Image (tube, coloured by chain):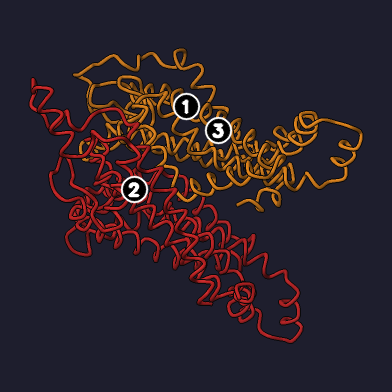
Chain colours: A red, B orange
Amino acid sequence: MLSWLIKRLLMLVPVFLAVSVVIFSILHFIPGDPIDNLLKIGSSPEARAEMEARYGLDRPLPVQYLIWLSNVLQGDLGTAIVARRPVADLIAQALPHSLRLGGLALLFSTVVGVTLGVVAALSRDRWPDRAIMGGVLVGSTMPSFWLGLILILIFSVGLGWFPVSGARGWQSLVLPVLTIGLGGTALVARITRVSMIEAAGRDFVTLLHAKGLSPLRIQLRHVLRHALIPVVTILALRIGWILGGAVTVEVVFARPGLGTLLIKSLSQHDYPVVQACLLMLAMAVMLGTLMGDILQALMDPRVRAAMT
Amino acid sequence: MTAPLRAFRRPQGGLAGGWLILVIAAALAAPLLTPYAYDVQNLPQAYQPASARHWLGTDEFGRDLLTRLIYGARTSLSVSATAISISVLCGMVLGAAAAWFGGWLDRAVTMVVDLSWSFPEILIALILVAIIGPGTIGVMIAIAVAYIAQFTRLTRAQILTLKGETFIEAARSLGAGHAHILFRHLLPNALAPVLVSAMLATGDAIILEATLGFFGLGAQPPVPSWGGMMSAGSALVFKAPWVIIFPGLAVAVTVVAINLYGDALIAELDIRSRLRREA
């Protein structure tokens, strides 16, 4: 297990390098020069050159990349050009908000999604199944920012239960978590249902029935265990998808976080901040996939056996 | 190609297909359907709720919401459908080439696809729009690129399974060249699952287009798009909630219809297992 884990971690290194090259180079294609925002109108070319030198923008791109990468690896994400503060500070401020939101949304969609999926699979083709799958379809087709605004309209404006925006107290988390979570719930419920139905057709289930175990016990103790493996795999692969949902939802609810920071710095052409945000999201995606692999190994003896 | 027609005979497929035809027809015939123009302001009529004159009410400039919704369908549907067509074409070429030739080409394509697969489409699209610049064309290209990975992956997997079939071996032993086998034998057989998933992806693309529009990056005013209308409506959510409710409903209902019709089509074509293998 340990040697597998080390190998798996080492495999992340080339992926990380590839991602970092992409993130670094993409942003240099973005039109709009952040230096223009800093210089007073009518500044001399010398002032401009001095400003470029201060941020290292006058050196060739590969050199800029290597300097950037070595700084990043030392935890120095550079200085925000527009906000004029260390990027690491901005990220450190935003990250906990996004992690809390994303984590709770993930938890919500797993718990609710698996429950709905199990109920739908157990009542296959009867009305609870149809109602759940119908709701899941509708839930997954609503744009998340729209759903967020409608929830605000109903629960904040209409009923006054939760605040409209901001990030103060747990009440402000309920609607954003619900908004992101509903999309994820739909995905989890659909996969759980399909893999429950698939697992229920396996030979070992027939055997358990023949042994005379109660059908509900078979479903919940044996079939569900089997069915959860693909759920974990897909959930881990789609962690980035939940974070992507966080980006839009943070903007709708005017919450601090990586998403709001990313959108703001994209519009201000603040390269270092955008790079750092993307890097954080990419790392979250990679760690998510890694965690999915580990969980899968812990849950599935066949995978564990193949690892050693 | 009777499967798309047969899908209409299923109850869900018929209902969903009917809605899609209605939306497409309305988008095409927009000027004939409504007495109003989508861009003429009429300030005394601003913020009107639904009435006999304005079936869905008016927006902050007094423009008829239903008119803008119908014209918005033009933008949203054409942008999404064009974008997905581009990504299907690119994805099929890349995927087929990777699967057929194998070797370093396959490894390179798979690596890039896996890499972009782990990033949510919305992030890829956001960054691309930032590079290309906002507007209809920028959004179209951004969506197209964001979905290439999906179709490359699907085509590659289809071709890989087909490659080992006897009829391909037969074609090869008869002396058929690469191009002949790829275009005459492999791609036609891989087409059905790819086209169905393209249809489902168009639904996702409509949502993505609306999201980019919501950030103000899509079609620029006064040209309406569903996302752009919601972007304007989000500021009015307390004063005139209908301005944002109806475009969102249009997106949701249309995407549900695409999914239901797609499901009926999958059942008709009997390709569920071929699609699931790639999910």
Kind of element beneath mark 3? helix
Kind of element beneath mark 2? helix
Residue drawn where x is 69% and y is 44% of the image: B102
| A219 lies left or right of A232 | right
Q: Tag 3: residue type?
A: Ser
Residue drawn where x is 48% and y is 45% of the image: B116
- Subunit of label 1: B
Residue B250 screen position, x and y as percent: 43, 35
| A204 lies left or right of A59 | right
| B15 lies left or right of B69 | right
Q: Which residue is mark 2?
A: A278
Image vertical order of residue A57 relative to residue A208, above or below:
above
Labelled disc at residue A48: none
Quadrant occupied by the C terminus of chain A: bottom right
Q: Mark 2 and mark 1, same subunit?
A: no
Asked whether residue A68 is in view, the answer is: yes
Kind of element beneath mark 1? helix
Quarter of image, res B220: top left
Q: Which residue is mark 3?
A: B87
- Subunit of label 2: A
Image vertical order of residue A283 relative to residue B54, above or below:
below
Of marks 2 and 3, the one in the foreground? 2
Of marks 3 and 1, the one in the foreground? 3
* For the residues bearing labels 3 and 1, Cβ distance under 8 angstroms: no
Give the spatial CA distance, label 2 vs label 3.
24 Å
Q: Tag 2: residue type?
A: Leu
Quadrant occupied by the N terminus of chain A: bottom right
Residue A166 screen position, x and y as percent: 18, 53
User: Which comes sooner in the sequence, label 3 or label 1?
Assistant: 1
Q: Which residue is mark 1?
A: B79
